[in-house]
Image (cartoon, grey):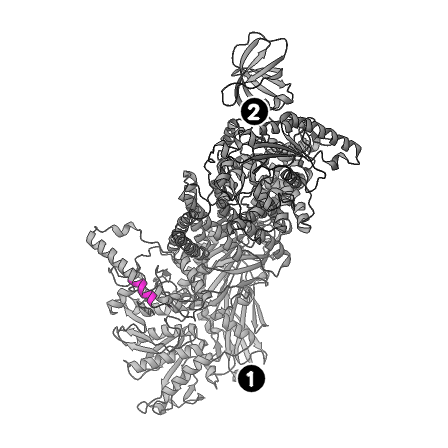
Amino acid sequence: MFYFSRMLLVSTAITALSSAVSLGAAQAQNQSNPFAADRSATNVAVSLNDVQTPSSTLRRFDASTDEFFLSGERTTLTIPFYVTPIETTRNAKFVLALQSAVSVMPETSNLNVRVNGVPVAQTRLGTGKADRVEADLPAGLLQPGFNAIEIMTDQNHRVDCSLPGTYELWTQIDPAASGIDFGLASIPMNQLSDLATIAGVGTDRTRINIVVPTSSPDATQVSQAMAIAQALTIIGNISRPLVTIGPSVAMGPGLDVLLANTGGQSAEGWHTRDEQTLSPGIVYQPGTRETPSRLVLGDGERNSSDRAISDLVDLAGTLKPAGTDTGLAALERRNGANLQANEPVALSDLGLDTSEFSGRFYRSDITFSLPSDFYPADYDRAELTLDAAYAADLSSDASLVINANGRQVTAIPLRSTLSGTIEDQTIKIPLGFMKPGKNKITFQASLLNMADVACDPTVMADLRPRFAIRSTSTLQLPKVAQIGHLPDLALIANGSAYSEPRSDQPLSLLVTDRSAATLGGAATFIARIAQASKQIRPVTLQTGLRDDGQADVLAIGTYATLPSEVLRATGLEDGTAFQSSVSEIVDDKVSLSSGSRLLEPVKATFFASFEQPINLTERLDELRNSISAFFQGTRSAFGRLPGLSSFLETKGFVALGNIPDKATALTVISQAATPGPVPRTWTVVAGPDQNSLSQGIIELTEPSNWQQLQGAAVALAPDGTLVSFAAEGERLFETQPRSVSNLRLVFAGWLSRHLLEYLLGLSLIALLLGLSTRALIGRVGANTK
Amino acid sequence: MYKRLCGFAWLFFALSFLILVQQPVSVDAQWNIAATALAVATAIYIIRLEGVWRYVFLSAISIVVFRYAYWRTTSTIPSPDDLISFIPAILLYGAEMYCLLMLALSLFVVADPIERPRAAQFPDEELPSVDVFVPSYNESSDILSLTLAAAKGLDYPAEKLRIFLLDDGGTDQKRLSSDKAAASAAIDRHHELQHLCTELGVTYLTRSANVHAKAGNLNNGLLHSRGDLVVVFDADHAPAREFLRETVGHFIEDRKLFLVQTPHFFANPDPLERNLSTFQHMPSENEMFYGQIQKGLDKWNSAFFCGSAAVLRRSALEQVGGFSGVSITEDCETALDLHSRGWNSLYVDRPMVVGLQPDTVASFIGQRSRWCRGMLQIMLLKNPLFRSGLSLPQRLCYMSSMMFWFFPFVRLAFLVAPLLLILFDLKIFDASVDEFIAYSVSYLIAGELLRNYLYGRVRWPWVSDLYEYVQSVYLLRAIVSVILNPRRPTFNVTAKGQTLDRNQLSELAWPYFAIFGVLLFATGVVAYRFQTEPEIGGMLLVVGAWNLLNLIVAGAALGVVTERMERRQTPRLASQREGQLFFGDERIDVSVEDVSLGGAKVTVLSDMANLPDDRRARLLVNSHSGRGTLQSIPIEIRSFTSSDQGLVLGVNFRAGTQHYATLANLMVADLDIVRKHRAGRQVARGVFRGSLGFIRWGLARPFQAFHHLLFDRDEPSAMPSKPVAPAVYPSGAAVSSEQTRY
């Protein structure tokens, strides 16, 4: 686990570095520096574990070690933190355990903490040893519900003035030893929404253990367990759930869920501890830092746990989070704010750092969310209106680079002998750069100046501002096209791995065994989807493929055990030239670490299809079939008018043809759209063996990876890199009430995703227009005899 | 039936095209689309495919143009919140949309220019009777006698041809003027011309008062004549012999025909041609109008009267009370009136008159100002869109001809827009550099390709821009005054035949220098800002390039307003007539190379033993048909030079009135040489070569102009020539309607 986090960190550092290199700023000799940074980070993490002895009453923040790795010259981390009403009456102490890199210069580096916007603590960074920040929080500062904890750092390098040097600046906060201490051994809860406090318990992952009576639960029990896992993830706002399903209670921190349904179990025996009834039939038994809490559903009466589960599910569907304004904003930002069309939103509201920056490498980003049926194509542009300022005499490669989801949008040069302002400059980001669900736009400004070349230690403390993006900068989204389109794993990431937007549409879970590992992996995956979508889907268990074309299928297993039909349809079966409307093979893979050219498949050439010896009869048959199919398709499409989906219907599954390096991948997610007017998704999560698969699911459900799911397939390599593969084909289906404006946008989007077709169509029409003009002109007006 | 089918098919394809072409797609996709369309268009352009390919070319260009228009409308207009930027932005947008509208109209006009077959020939007894009107205001008797003599020499049954000199310089009003000197001049003129007419066998007509200017004068002619057809020649428009044979037949064939218009051809360069030295090899400005646009108008039965060199039907004119005189361009107005009564017009693309153009920038501007004001008057007072009786194509054609004259506003917008960006930092064009290149540049290329494909033979690249710019500086005020008061403009007679004794700046030159200075300053500002404001560097490059383009046009215009010396009072016409020179008894075979009213250049063909002492001689020339000779003309040898062909003599005519018929025959009876010269100039110059040449003007001419500005100390002036009167009636509203551009 930990190893993987570190590896990801390395890859992130490399990504960032390579962008820096691409700016032309970094010199080749500096490239080894990030690895140095990583080594120290690892060391620190180890030493933190050695040194810190957290209080037994400390409540942790809901942030992972990765999130607590504050790298760069200035960082801002905002964490939503749920406080129960009882806790607000207590004296609280804010605790942070941290260590900074040795390269951080103490004179000018510091860390500030604000709670709900109120400064509560400040410390000097760069002392070189593990540090501890403590502050008493005045009563009334924390409010019931979500509160915002903001941790801001300013870090400067002791000796290095280069851009890669900024990667050596970091502070690692130890998540296990940081939090808020209310002096309570257990979390006092008295309502269901207080379950949000479980997000911070335990380790990096929030463990939910659902206890089922047998080691091989039946379909009903699995369905119930899945419902519980989804409901708790939503109620608790758990961004990193780790769900297990098994017959035994767990050890260590986390939450055990027990079903007190029938007299068969010793339900009575469970009611032994200091417990709180959150709702009729739902009882909470507090644990400690070391032992799990318990949630008992049902009171022992027959079907009482069923009622409790349905209460839980209902609550998850209706719960509106409460808390302070800043706390709710922090929560929304974590999920990605939804933006209204044609309304400018201040970038600072989306999380951008808009204060004056005096370092050498400005890095900040904004996140926002787009609807799950958002159709990403270049039919329109989001408008970023930028107000910024920069200092005089920056070096020749000083520039502001703006990336949207890893693709560069623009690079604005900032080199001048005079200081300058960027006023009201509009940057248009094509909607093709966006994706359904959470989107991220990063701003990176390299701001070296002449003094940095000399890097004189006596002037290194010069902290005159070099750059600022003003808070008047805004982002405005146009009205976007909304239509379901498959396959697209970004839909999964956004919680809509379903063809139907309605939440009562069941999901068929296809597993080949009911082992704890398999079911736990499936539950973790499904819970993560629910956390993103805030919707609970009924799950029906299947052990073999029963395809009636009516339900979305999620298949989880190893290549050896999964039905070959499913593997074939999703392009995961070896050596099968699988039949679909999509013949292109994506061989242009680009790893996330190098950034930009994701989702740009290289098509197989026209001539490649003639590599096989030509059987003329066969070819003619094909031609005849395709022509008759075309007419049939056209006729039936007209017969079903109005119906956009039928217009775009194709035969066979639409998915990726073949995934080139699945054998070496830890885990692969691949999605196919089924044939038919209303396509369903077949999503396969598969690995070479059970261990790889379990590990892969955990890695994939990490928020940083989860947000990167897109395309028809994603392969997770053992080194932690994600590779996305695009399907050239797509299947569309309507998700919105039909309107001309939306259909027009969808049509435009479809054309811009099918440029060749557009070009041919337009050329043909232009030709016909020319010919018909000639014919008409010859028949009107005067003519020479 | 088949026509209706074609109409429906066209409508269907046009709608599909519109839907498909205005889809918003990415900038990359736009590049692909534009590149494909331009590649197709370029291929057709290079191979010079015509016929049906013309329409494929047009639709390929339409893709780029429509995509630009859609993008420009939907993506580039800044928010109305910032009014200071928004108002100029909308004005610029309006100017561009006007350009697109004009483009559409002009494409409609030249959709299918037609070539008329030669008029049918009829036996003399079936021909209608013809009255030729030569209206005059203040032209000299020399020039009038040439025109009248040429008219008298027209190939037509003599009993059916009457020539009228309509003298407005000798009216009762003029002769009884309270200004004694003017009155006496008018009386002298009256008598002189009466005498001339008697000698030439021409009817002299004048009237009591100069009301309704040229239209009134022509109507007076109508009152005093009875011919079935009426021909109008301006005083300086001497016709070729075949004029009536090439035109009258059409009237017999079409009973509803009211007009046959023929092109005007000019023997002298206009100021732009003279000052940039292009007259010998570049097609004249009016050739685009007469070579393409009138032919296009003819397709839609919209060819209009251009004031001279035209035949009209009397019965048609009488139906509308003669020539219309509401506006100061009576010619176009008359045609509009008659078209709306259901009469037809027709255009014969054969130059058969030779006339004069204004010589100085000032008189050129004055002439264009009259055309501009006149056409706008018609548009405001008799708007063809709302006038009953016209067909839809006719409405569009007339609107195209009239709306063309708003070009000064567009010029102004395109001149000022980059300055607003450069000097005042207004954001009036909301686009990224990528978009600008993908949309605007492809649009500009498409426009240039289109122009060159359609008009390449009659108009070199960028020359339209230069003509428009030179006129715009002074036409803006004229337009505004017409819009404010459409009935106010009065008829000013264009001065022609002026001479300039040295190179000098036009008296109208200073605004051109001022504009050039501002543009030059803005170019410097761009260079400075490019250094200091890297964040908008890309945009500055784009705007700077735009401004540079304006600067080059303004630079070339400085060349236009630097007037070149012009000593020749009457222009020479090329000739290739053989003849003999008689010195007493000695006879020498000669060939006449060129000829003007004053003299000729002749090459000696046979050996000339010794030079005669007496420089007086007689020139006997063969007739145009080559059979027989004409009356001999007394001459005096002025100069001897030698050339490749041999000895060349410069001779002056010592001609009397009785010789004018011969002179007219020698000069204009056979215009084949002149026509050949015109055709020889009509060679397309490619976009690349044309642009290079234009840039050379833009770079070099300002230096000469500034030299004059700094070192010429005395007042510049144009001198009216002595023998040729200072002003003649202008040659009608030759409107060079064409697509405009940035």
Is B269 included in the stretch rendered in magenta? no
The answer to if A633 sits in the magenta stretch is yes
Q: Secondary structure at mark 2?
A: helix
Which of the image's four quarters has the N terminus of chain A? bottom left
- Classify residue A552 as left or right of residue A370: left
Magenta stretch, main secondary structure class = helix
Q: Amino acid at mark 2?
A: Asn
| Labels 1 & 2 near each other (Cβ < 8 A) | no
Question: Label 1: few (<14), some or many (≥20) within 10 Å?
Answer: some
Out of B206 and A746, give the one closest to the viewer.
B206
Q: Which residues are magenta?
A: A632-642
Front residue (pair A132, A93):
A93
Residue A9 visible at all: yes
Q: Quadrant of the C terminus of chain A?
A: top left
Which-is-in-front pick, marks 1 and 2?
2
Residue corresponding to mark 1: A89
Q: Secondary structure at mark 1?
A: loop
- The residue wearing badge 2 is B665
Of residues A749 and A244, which is closer to you in this image? A749
